[in-house]
Image (spheres, grey):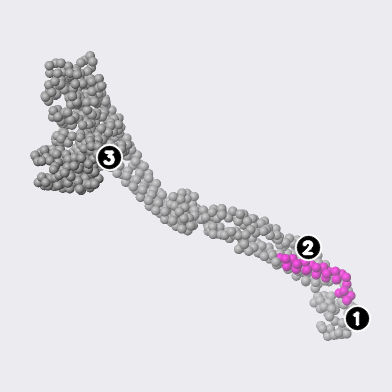
Amino acid sequence: MVDSINLTNYGQVFKDNELSGLKEKNFFYGKNGTGKSTLCQVINEQLGREFDVRVFQGFESVIGEDEKLNSIVLGESNKLVQKEIDSKLEIISENEVQAIKKNELLKSLKGFDEVEKSPFLSQYEKSQDDVRKKEDEIGLLYQKCAGEITSEFNLARNYSRKNFRNDIPNSRKLTEDEYKKSLAIYVTTEKRKIIEREFPSINFESYCKSVNEIIESKVNAIVIKELKENSLKRSFAEEGLKIHNEGDKCAFCGGEVTAERIVELESVFNTKEVFRLQDRIKQGIAKIEECIDILSNIDILNASDFYSHLDTEKVNSRLIDIKKEQMNFLKECKMQLEKKEKELFISMDSFEMRIPLSFTTIQKDLNELIKSHNEFSNDIEKSKSEAKRKLILHRVAEKCEQMGTERLQGELVTLKKTSTDLKKILSDEIEKIESDKRKIESEIIEQRKELKQLQEKIKNPEIIIKNISEKISKSGKKNLELKYIESGKHYKIINKDGSTRNIQEISTGEKNIIAFLYFIGSLDSPELETGKPKIIVLDDPMNSNDDTMQYLIISEIEKLYSRKNLFKHFILLTHNSHFYLKVTFGRRVRRDGKNPYEMDNFVRMINDGNLTSFKYLKHKNEDFTTQYGSLWKELKFLYDNDKKDFMCNTIRRIIETYVVFNGVSGNKDAESKMLFNTNSHYTEIGDLETDINGYSREDIIGLMRKFFKQNNAEVNFNNYWNKL
């Protein structure tokens, strides 16, 4: 079955994008110019591949230019062959039912709207829903985390939950030191570059050797007994020599300082050897003090000059240790020399002290530190960006740990696997049903081929011609008998007296009835059988000249749409409301109490002066009851769509119909008569006397109401107008 016809490529004709709700039997009413023929063309174009579309559009579609009817074969046969045909048709019908059932199963498996879903599909869709819910749950958590990270690092809209999801595989928690370092880099500001420093180089081994040489040496002088083994007395005597003169009292012993004593002491302390040693000690102390002064002026690194992530503390700690060790060494050397200064006449033991480390041991580390600082300054933005990236990935790792991403992803994987398994089960079931359906359809094709072979056995042109001629004769046409000419494969028209009529002399109505009956007969022709299900379309089958044949045409159409297994869709289109009412009577008036408008499709094709739209009738109150009533419905449509130019013609026809059936005088109101008549025949008048633009639609209806009121028929007006 076909549910709808696509009309999107015919927007110049139809207002609607599709013709929907097609049923097995469909009846369309539309005036000429509403696109009925175009609709037939669309049906043939869109459905011609899947269906055997048979369209009747008057005698032109059947009778060739040489005025010969096409060769036709009807399904007439003897009882024996017909019984086989009926049996074959029954088998085909049963297989078609099975095919329909399989198709319904497929629809339920594929989720078509008009059928209940299969449990296979419901379970799969639920699994998909479970996956979506879990993805939404995870997505919302990711979105929340992304928002927090965006806020912390001022990322604006550049960091979404998608970015967060993509960062998870690369995320890693930083160690405390790594975090501090990355954070320091991220928040740092640019600093000035630092020049490399040079440290003093002191030969401590040389100092040690020199000091030991000095303290191990002694002065060979005159020995004074009381000073020999008392260094304190010797030092005091040396100082006393400097402050006492001859005749002074000794500050130590109170005795008189004699000239002889002064000469004696000078012989001990004022020798060249003593002066040389003393001078060497003084020079050594001076050099040591100079070195101590140099070391004292060495400052540690100012941490604020360096980027905070660089470890200045380590270098400073080593710098302080080395400086302290060197200072202590020099101070010890100085102390030894000062001690020797008081012990010039004895040899002191050499002192042993570990030679301190030189600054060269930290010079490399310092240079590396300064180099790292300066290089960081050269590319600070890149370093900050890298640090920021590490911090973001650290936060991602933290948040994944907090919300249990691994657990959530595990749950999602499980749900996806379940959904995948259910999808395979569903796909396998669909494939199985489709395979069964293909087998049945293949059997139907083969059975149709066999049916065609049976039908070919019983074709009998003489019987066909006889049946058509009998039908025409019973309808009152005695001079319209058909005779088949085997040699030319064509038909001649025979008068009652046996003479041949020229087909050009046959009226339009006569041609139409012959063509119509041929079309009806051709539906059973095996020569025209395609093996596809049929769609039968009758486009205005009754010509205006067919009045005498109306009963025959209606009778044949009723028989046609009542046949079973002949077609998938039957479509009738007409512009004749009287014919529409007659031919649909058997479908509109049902004895089973069912709503015929639910069983069959009744459609109005309504043109608003530009495009045609479809109105699908749902109840008998929406349908015609008489031709007169159809004119009122047409007027209401034109009124609702403000088509003033067309309203006048319809009103004129309503008034004329009322006048004829009720035997009253015509419209005597000059204004309305001129308006209705003039604008109903404007194509025949060169200069219109009445301009309809000066009247509103309400004005026009008011003039119509006035006519009925003048003829005491306002009730008639109200009954039709107010109920529409």
Tell me where the magenta segment starts and ends, as one range.
Answer: 266-295
Does the residue at mark 3 contact the one at mark 1 (Cβ under 8 Å)? no
Q: Nearer the viewer, mark 2 or mark 3?
A: 3
Residue for badge 3:
610
* Left-right relation of 489 to 656: right
Q: Residue at x 37, y 45 (%)?
A: 416
The residue closer to the viewer here, 515 or 216, is 515
Residue for badge 2:
209
Q: Is residue 267 above or below residue 717?
A: below
Measure the alpha-carbon separation of dots 2 and 3: 122 Å
**Residue 260, numbered label:** 1
Measure the alpha-carbon separation of dots 3 and 1: 155 Å
Amino acid under label 2? Answer: Lys
Q: Residue at x 15, y 44 (%)?
A: 669
In the rendered image, which quarter is residue 704 located in? top left
**Quick check: is 276 in the magenta stretch?**
yes
* Left-right relation of 401 to 220: left
Q: Residue at x 35, y 44 (%)?
A: 419
Amino acid under label 1? Answer: Glu
In the rendered image, which quarter is residue 117 located in? top left
Amino acid under label 3? Answer: Asn
Q: Earlier in the sequence, mark 2 or mark 3?
A: 2
Mark 1 Cα within 10 Å, few/some/many (few <14, many 20+)?
Answer: few
Q: Main secondary structure of the magenta part?
A: helix
